[in-house]
């Protein structure tokens, strides 16, 4: 029976491809017909029947081009474009509507039918589903566009620039002293950290601080836990009664730094996951658990999250981050060559004062060049511990005494547990 079915399908490929072209056109037509369901017959430019027939015509055009003339496909596509444009012009004279979406949907439907007939059924089906989703979510897409700010659009375009345009142009080979710098791998790390910050920013932008300090601080941790620590510490001086909740937010944002380390390792150096998993999880829990306990005890207090007034992605910042990564990669290779593992630990200590992402990404890159996994994991934990000490200092010297005690105690527990577990 299975053999018979396989032979039957193989013998009727043309019919099945034409059927796929018809069904894909029908799918687009269902959405277009639903959109115009309130209009009278004859007022709609194209609905379910028209799109289904256009999809079928696209399939037949490929069939005829293969058997009769290769000019049939482009000729029929031009005919469809002319018919759709004529219908648009006639309708525009009667209705105040300048949207050309229907014209585009008809041309796409023809192309989907042609793709299906050419044997690219999966590609045609995928493109059709994406098209239908875009057509069906008109209000949602326009709503997002209306809420989008100029600096956010600028940031998105810059992210595309550094990832889609710049990244493919860079050489993917080791260069420089100690062969420490791979331009492609270095810039890929820049794109990675920029993308994570970008996602974190928009998570806060969309859901906002009104969902509570836990939610706000979690996504602020993706963007900048240092910035949140500074702002919450200042707010604790202005509103001392909110110190417990602000301390909870700082701990959550700082705790989010540790899962981020695991994400980097999973993407760039999976071998580091094993030596890092236990200490990083311990450091995360040492911050998350006190934060949850504090929040549950004081959750009735109102609190506002940090203002998102900065640009979610500054190209200048990304370039500086790339330069810092290059410097750390070179310094790491040089120190390891001269002093061995102790040199790398010294580098991690100084790098952790300002940033954990840069040293983490640099070390994951160095492991690809042969750096011992246990040494790399220890260096990353040292950097994270030093960074925690710095943020604790911000809470102690800027925030209230209550905030300092709550944040400092949890931070001390976190870095102690991480260092002990990584050295065991």
Image (cartoon, helix red, strand yellow):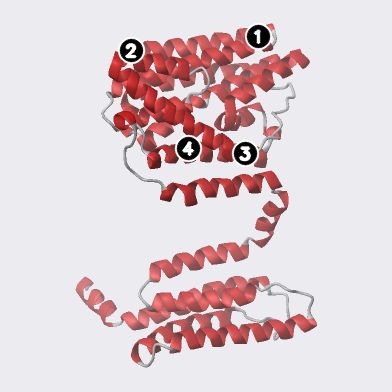
- Mark 1 crowdedness (10 Å alpha carbons): few <14, some 14-19, many ≥20: few
Whether residue 239 is visible here, answered yes or no, is no
* Disc on the earlier residue, 3 or 4: 4
Furthest-front residue in this view: 177
Dot placed on the residue nearer the N-terminal end, 3 or 1 = 3
Residue 233 is left or right of residue 109, and the answer is right
Q: Dot 3: within a 10 Å radius of its alpha carbon, few (fewer than 14), some, or many (20 or more) residues?
A: many
Q: Which mark is residue 190?
A: 4
Give the Cα separation between the discs numbered 1 and 2: 31 Å
Do the residues under discs 1 and 4 have CB atoms within 8 angstroms? no
Specify which label sits upstream in the sequence, 3 or 2. Answer: 3
Indicate the quadrant containing the N terminus: top left, top right, bottom left or bottom right: bottom left
Residue wearing tag 2 = 342
Question: In the rendered structure, which disc, 1 or 4, sits on the residue that comes first in sequence?
Answer: 4
Residue placed under numbered mark 3 in the picture: 312
Query: Rounded to the nearest whole Å, what is the CA distance between mark 2 and mark 4?
Result: 27 Å
Q: Is residue 95 visible?
A: yes
Q: Please tell me whether mark 3 sits on a helix, a strand or a loop.
A: loop
Q: Considering only vertical position in the picture, is 417 above or below 274?
A: above
Q: Earlier in the sequence, mark 2 or mark 4?
A: 4
- Dots 3 and 2: beta carbons under 8 Å? no
**Image point (33%, 29%), residue name:** 177
Mark 4 closeness class: few <14, some 14–19, many ≥20 residues within 10 Å: many
Relative height, residue 255 to residue 81 (above, below): above
Q: What residue is pinned by disc 1?
A: 397
């Amino acid at each position: 029976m299975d053999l018979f079915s396989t032979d039957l399908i193989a013998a009727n490929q043309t019919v099945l491809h034409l059927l796929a072209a018809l069904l894909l056109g029908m799918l687009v037509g269902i959405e277009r017909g639903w959109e115009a369901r309130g209009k009278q017959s004859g007022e709609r430019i194209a609905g379910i029947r028209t799109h289904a027939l256009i999809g079928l015509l696209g399939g037949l055009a490929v069939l005829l081009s293969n058997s009769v003339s290769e000019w049939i496909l482009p000729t029929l596509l031009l005919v469809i474009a002319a018919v759709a444009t004529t219908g648009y012009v006639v309708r525009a004279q009667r209705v105040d509507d300048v949207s050309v979406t229907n014209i585009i949907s008809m041309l796409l439907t023809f192309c989907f039918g042609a793709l299906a007939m050419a044997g690219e059924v999966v590609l045609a089906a995928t493109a059709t589903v994406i098209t239908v989703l875009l057509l069906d979510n008109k209000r949602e897409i326009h709503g997002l566009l209306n809420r989008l700010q100029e600096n956010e659009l600028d940031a998105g375009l810059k992210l595309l620039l550094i990832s889609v345009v710049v990244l493919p142009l860079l050489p993917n080979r080791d260069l420089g002293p100690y062969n420490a710098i791979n331009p492609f791998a270095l810039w890929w790390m820049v794109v990675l950290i920029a993308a994570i910050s970008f996602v974190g920013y928009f998570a806060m932008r969309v859901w906002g601080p009104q969902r509570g300090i836990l939610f706000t601080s979690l996504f602020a941790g993706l963007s900048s836990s240092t910035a949140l620590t500074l702002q919450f510490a200042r707010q604790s001086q202005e509103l001392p009664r909110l110190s417990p909740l602000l301390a909870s937010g700082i701990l959550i944002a700082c705790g989010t730094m540790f899962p981020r380390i695991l994400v980097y390792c999973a993407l760039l150096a999976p071998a580091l996951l094993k030596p890092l998993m236990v200490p990083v999880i311990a450091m995360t829990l040492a911050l998350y658990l006190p934060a949850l306990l504090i929040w549950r005890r004081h959750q009735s207090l109102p609190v506002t999250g940090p203002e998102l007034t900065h640009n979610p992605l500054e190209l200048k910042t990304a370039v500086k981050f790339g330069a810092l990564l290059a410097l750390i990669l070179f310094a790491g290779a040089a120190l390891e060559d001269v002093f061995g593992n102790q040199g790398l630990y010294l580098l991690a200590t100084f790098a952790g004062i300002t940033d954990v992402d840069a040293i983490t990404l640099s070390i994951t890159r160095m492991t690809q060049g042969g750096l011992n996994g246990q040494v790399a994991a220890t260096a990353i934990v040292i950097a994270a511990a030093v960074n925690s000490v710095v943020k604790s200092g911000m809470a102690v010297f800027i925030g209230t005494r209550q905030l300092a005690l709550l944040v400092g105690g949890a931070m001390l527990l976190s870095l102690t547990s991480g260092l002990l577990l990584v050295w065991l």
